[in-house]
Image (tube, helix red, strand yellow):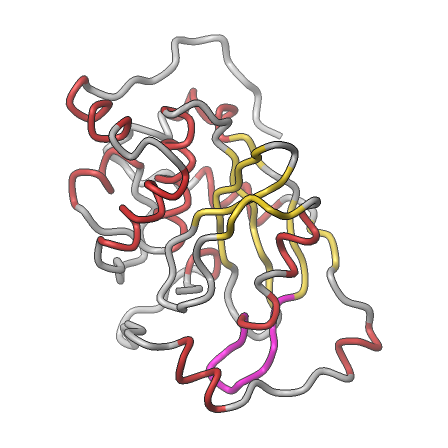
Amino acid sequence: MFEVFSISLPVFSSSELRRLRALKTPVGIQRFLDAIPYHLAPTAWSPRVVLREHTAHCLEGATFAAAALRVVGFPPLLLDLEADNDTDHVIAVFKVRDHWGAIAKSNFTGCRYREPVYRTLRELALSYFNIYFNLRGERTLRRYSRPVNLSQFDPYDWMTSEEDVWVVPNHLCDIPHTPLLTAGQIKALTRVDRRTIEGEITGHQRDHSKPTPRIFRRG
């Protein structure tokens, strides 16, 4: 765990705050992420840089969403979905009337927004299962983390840093994850059909020339 220091909260400029407050709701934040290009680079940009550069990948999109949620009145929470033979997916999670929803940036059609209708985080994580697969058609989602409140990283200026904020993904990699499936269920899994694959990778972007860390390649 990282020590939480007693310092002033890092702040956005008045212009940045206006842009973030204009998103108003979780679905407004998701629409912003859907409208910007997918960022094909091994970086860990802060929300400030994402707002300026107008592009993000999975990790950066989730971190941006957490900051935007904080601005409009929600806790800045991330949750990591962990896979076998595939890459992790990071989502920002929020709660409305005791039900969980999620915001995410992804190249995969179904790995994005979730309405706040899920009673537990397990239910929310499982909602990604059927469309979480690698390009060989293997169903790969296996585990999920607890929610991580990014306010603990305020001493690292995670919202406004001009440097990559690797402290966030490093922490997500290190924390415990809860299994979603039993060994018997994993053994009995079928492969995803071609029609589902084609639907999910519509508009998929991938740069084969640059390896990227496992924490945010889901996209």
Residue at figure coordinates x 37%, y 30% from the top left: 158
Residue at figure coordinates x 35%, y 68% from the top left: 211
Q: Is residue 125 left or right of residue 14?
A: right
Q: Depth check: 102 or 4 in front?
A: 102
Magenta span main SS: loop
Q: Depth check: 43 or 190 in front?
A: 190
- Determine which quarter of the picture holds residue 147: top right
Residue projecting furthest to the bottom = 194
52 to 154, vertically: above or below: below
Would you say residue 104 sits in the magenta stretch?
Answer: no
Quarter of the C terminus within the rendering? bottom left
Residue at figure coordinates x 56%, y 34% from the top left: 96
Quarter of the N terminus within the rendering? top right
- The magenta segment: 132-141
Residue at figure coordinates x 48%, y 91% from the top left: 194
Q: Is residue 98 left or right of residue 188?
A: left
- Determine which quarter of the picture holds residue 190: bottom right
Location of residue 53 in the rendering, given as x and y in whole percent from the top left corner = 16, 45
Location of residue 156 in the rendering, given as x and y in whole percent from the top left corner = 40, 26
Location of residue 29 in the rendering, given as x and y in whole percent from the top left corner = 34, 41
99 to 133, vertically: above or below: above
Location of residue 155 in the rendering, given as x and y in whole percent from the top left corner = 43, 20
113 to 27, vertically: above or below: below
Q: Depth check: 91 or 83 in front?
A: 91
Q: Is residue 178 left or right of residue 112?
A: right
